[in-house]
Each structure stands twice: as structure tokens, then as C-alpha cells.
Image (tube, helix red, strand yellow):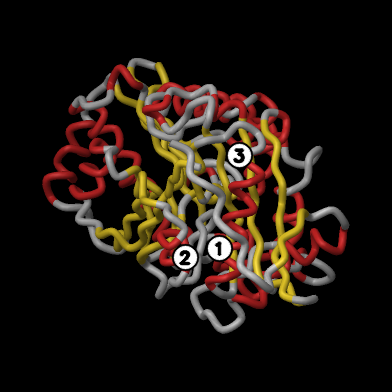
């Protein structure tokens, strides 16, 4: 049953972003809210502007969004997005989709009254477009920064992961939202050898003439990307929240990722010559951009280019990993995963000076990936939560 709209608190005014100045205020707000948060990493402002702009982000080819800001007088006190994605609405209900589902995200608020006003305004925008199940945060999609950080506020996020003020959890529950799915990140000390049992599994795989685990070839970037995305679309197709990337989104992602693709950090596993699994690892770019204050110009771009020539980082992040569906839950799938993990672990320590890795996010009910993480003696270091409410 749909619930009545929440009242907008007195003194808070919420309006939709219309002008360039308002868009800039929307992007810049976190720089003030997190100014004293040592764990926050400033995003690159140009990247955020591109994320929000039709024509620069192909997500808008299948989705529509409103960007809302809250004010007390002339002071901007919060922001939120509200969005309807046709591909999400085409997904099965048990995978987080449905024709009446809409999302919100990009949520920031400096006080409970601002939070309540923003959520009410986002829900109103969604309700007018036929949405009856509001879900978030997605900033803007599951491929960007999904979930609210509810545990792990004391250390910085890795690249492409969000960071939020601890108070936000209470703001959402006060608005009637309940958690629908948790996303876990796992931390691993990669300076230590993997457990003996896993080493024996890896050795056994290396003796198997059917198995080949190879680096990607950057000279054949488009071909290699197509192989990886083909495996990804098959491996993740039954996962909760999974939305297939369109051709335009694949091309866009490839263009963005190519400068940070390092051949020894991305592996493809083949069985009898057929690619069946992959693992993608990225140096934690947050470590390389943290001191740029979100600006690439006039000097940040040159600094970043220099640092990317031969990056030295403490942390590696594993954002994507997959095995084709027909092989999932088999011993061979685990063996391939451990082989790729070990080869990338060695390269990360030897070639980039890394000492730790973060694997994730991983869905709370993805037992296959969670089993691999537990076998590696990892620990959960961050938890992100997706919330939902009937409106």
C-alpha cells in the first residue's frame, strides 16, 4: 500500500537543479560537509559533472533523473537525485527490479530536517512517474556507487566506492526505509602467502594442461574488453541488482578505464582455449588523487599523469570478477579464481608496492564469492546497504 507523502519541514526549501550555478553547488556541497572528515577522498569534480550530464553519460539513454538541492535561506544544506531507469524496471522483481521501482542517490544532508525534506521531494518526483517502490542510494546506478556506508567509516574508501557521514543511516530509518541488501568489501593482507591449501590448489591447476591463465593484452584492448564483458554478462546475469551494460556504456567505460588498465593486474582464465573467467584489479586511484582537492587543472592533471606512469599504491581494489554461469559452484571455478588471485597478488606486491587488497563489493547472498573471500582469510572492512520503502 502506498504511503502518504512525508511533510516538508519548515524552513527547508527543495528545488530542482536548473542552472550551471546550481549544478556547481550540487557537485561542490560534499567538499564542505566532509571538510573535517579524514577518511573522505575528494572526487574529481569534472568526473561528477560528467556523471550528471546527458550526452556525457550514456546511462541517460535509458534513464531519466532529477537533481535536487535543499536550502535554508541562501545556504545549500543538502542534495539528492531521483531517477527512473527503464532497464531496472525491466528486471525481475526478485532481482531488485519491477515496473514500479525507482531509485534515488547522491544523498548528502547537513541535518535531519534537510534529510527529511530531500527524501520527501525525491519520493514526490518518483511518485509522479508511477514509482511505488523507492530504493537507494544508487549514485546513479549499480555500476557507479551503490549503497550507503553503514560500517567502516574510520578509513578511506577505495576507488569507485562511496563514503558517507555516519548520521545518514538514522536519517533513512527515520524516513521509514529498511535495508533490503548489504554489499560487503573484504580486506586482505597481500604481503603474506595464501593459505597452504589454496597454494596446493593453485599448483594443481598449473599442472593441468587444459588451463591457461593469462594477462590481458593492452594492444588488443577492444577485443579483450569484449571477452571480459561477455563473461561478466553471463556470470552476473542472475545477481540481485544486475543491469546489463549497453553498447554505449561499454564503450564509455572502456574509454575511461583504458588509462588505468595495467596488463599484469587483469587476468583471463581459459579452459581448453575458451575464456571462462576473469579478474580485474585496479590500483587505488584515490591514493593518487586525494591531494588534488577534486581539481585536475591547472596542475592536477600533470601530477596524475606522472603518477599513473608507474603507480605506487598501498591498496589494490578488485571491483570485478566472474566465472561463466555453467561453471559456477564447481571446484574448477574456485581453482581458476585462486590462480588469478595469486598471480595478481604477486604482481601487486612486486610491481606496485601494494600491501593490501580490497575485494568487493560482494552481495551478502553471493555465497560463491563469499566462500572464496573467507578461504583467503579476509575480513569484512566496509558494509554498504541498499534501502527500500513503499511510497
Number of marks in the image? 3
Q: Circle 1 sits on which residue?
A: 116
Q: Quadrant of the N terminus?
A: top left
Residue reaching furthest to the bottom: 36
Dividing the picture into quadrants, the one containing residue 348 is bottom left
Residue 166 x/y as whole percent? 44, 71
Residue at horizontal 50%, vertical 22%?
A: 230
Q: CA distance from mark 3 to mark 2?
A: 20 Å
- For label 1, the SS is helix
Residue at horizontal 86%, vertical 64%?
A: 21
Q: Circle 3 sits on which residue?
A: 127
Residue 352 x/y as whole percent? 48, 61
Residue 171: give its label: 2
Residue 22 x/y as whole percent? 82, 62
Asked if the residue at tag 2 contacts the one at tag 3, i.e. Cβ–Cβ closer than 8 Å, the answer is: no
Is residue 269 visible to us here? no
Residue 42 x/y as whole percent? 63, 69
Looking at the image, residue 100 sits to the left or right of residue 126; the answer is left
Residue reaching furthest to the left: 197
Of callouts 1 and 2, which one flags the residue occurring earlier in the amino acid sequence?
1
- For label 3, the SS is helix
Asked if the residue at tag 2 contacts the one at tag 1, i.e. Cβ–Cβ closer than 8 Å, the answer is: yes
Dividing the picture into quadrants, the one containing residue 12 is bottom right
Q: Nearer the viewer, residue 222 or 13?
A: 13
Up the image or down, 45 lies above or below 219; here it is: below
Q: CA distance from mark 1 to mark 2?
A: 7 Å
Q: Nearer the viewer, residue 67 or 28?
A: 67
Amino acid at each position: 500500500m502506498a504511503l502518504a507523502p512525508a511533510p516538508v519541514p519548515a524552513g527547508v526549501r527543495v528545488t530542482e537543479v536548473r542552472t550551471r550555478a546550481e549544478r556547481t553547488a550540487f557537485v561542490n556541497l560534499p567538499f564542505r560537509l566532509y571538510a573535517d572528515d579524514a577518511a573522505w577522498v575528494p572526487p574529481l569534480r569534472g568526473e561528477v559533472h560528467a556523471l550528471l550530464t546527458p550526452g556525457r553519460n550514456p546511462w541517460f539513454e535509458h534513464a531519466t533523473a532529477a537533481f535536487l538541492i535543499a536550502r535554508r535561506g541562501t545556504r545549500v544544506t543538502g542534495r539528492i537525485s531521483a531517477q527512473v531507469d527503464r532497464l531496472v524496471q525491466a528486471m525481475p522483481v526478485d532481482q531488485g527490479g519491477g515496473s514500479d521501482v525507482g531509485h534515488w542517490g547522491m544523498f548528502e544532508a547537513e541535518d535531519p530536517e534537510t534529510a527529511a525534506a530531500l527524501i520527501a521531494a525525491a519520493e514526490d518526483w518518483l511518485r509522479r512517474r508511477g514509482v511505488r517502490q523507492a530504493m537507494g542510494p544508487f549514485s546513479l546506478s549499480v555500476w557507479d556507487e551503490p549503497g550507503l556506508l553503514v560500517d567502516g567509516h574510520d578509513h578511506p574508501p577505495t576507488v569507485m566506492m562511496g563514503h558517507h557521514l555516519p548520521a545518514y543511516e538514522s536519517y533513512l530509518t527515520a524516513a521509514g526505509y529498511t535495508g533490503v541488501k548489504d554489499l560487503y568489501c573484504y580486506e586482505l593482507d597481500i604481503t603474506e602467502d595464501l593459505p597452504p591449501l589454496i597454494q596446493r590448489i593453485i599448483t594443481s591447476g598449473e599442472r593441468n594442461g587444459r588451463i591457461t591463465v593469462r594477462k590481458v593484452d593492452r594492444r588488443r584492448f577492444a577485443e579483450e574488453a569484449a571477452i571480459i564483458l561477455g563473461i561478466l554478462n553471463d556470470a552476473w546475469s542472475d545477481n540481485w541488482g544486475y543491469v546489463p551494460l549497453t553498447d554505449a556504456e561499454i564503450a564509455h567505460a572502456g574509454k575511461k578505464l583504458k588509462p588505468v588498465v595495467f596488463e599484469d593486474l587483469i587476468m583471463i582464465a581459459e579452459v581448453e582455449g575458451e575464456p571462462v573467467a576473469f579478474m580485474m584489479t585496479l590500483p587505488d586511484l584515490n591514493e593518487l588523487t586525494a591531494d588534488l582537492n577534486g581539481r585536475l587543472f591547472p596542475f592536477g592533471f600533470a601530477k596524475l599523469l606522472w603518477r599513473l606512469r608507474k603507480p605506487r599504491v598501498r591498496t589494490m581494489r578488485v571491483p570485478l570478477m566472474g566465472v561463466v554461469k555453467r561453471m559456477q559452484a564447481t571446484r574448477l571455478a574456485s581453482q581458476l579464481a585462486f590462480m588469478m588471485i595469486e598471480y595478481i597478488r604477486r604482481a601487486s606486491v612486486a610491481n606496485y608496492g601494494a600491501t593490501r587488497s580490497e575485494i568487493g563489493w560482494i552481495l551478502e547472498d553471493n555465497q560463491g564469492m563469499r566462500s572464496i573471500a573467507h578461504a583467503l582469510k579476509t575480513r569484512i572492512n566496509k558494509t554498504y546497504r541498499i534501502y527500500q520503502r513503499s511510497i
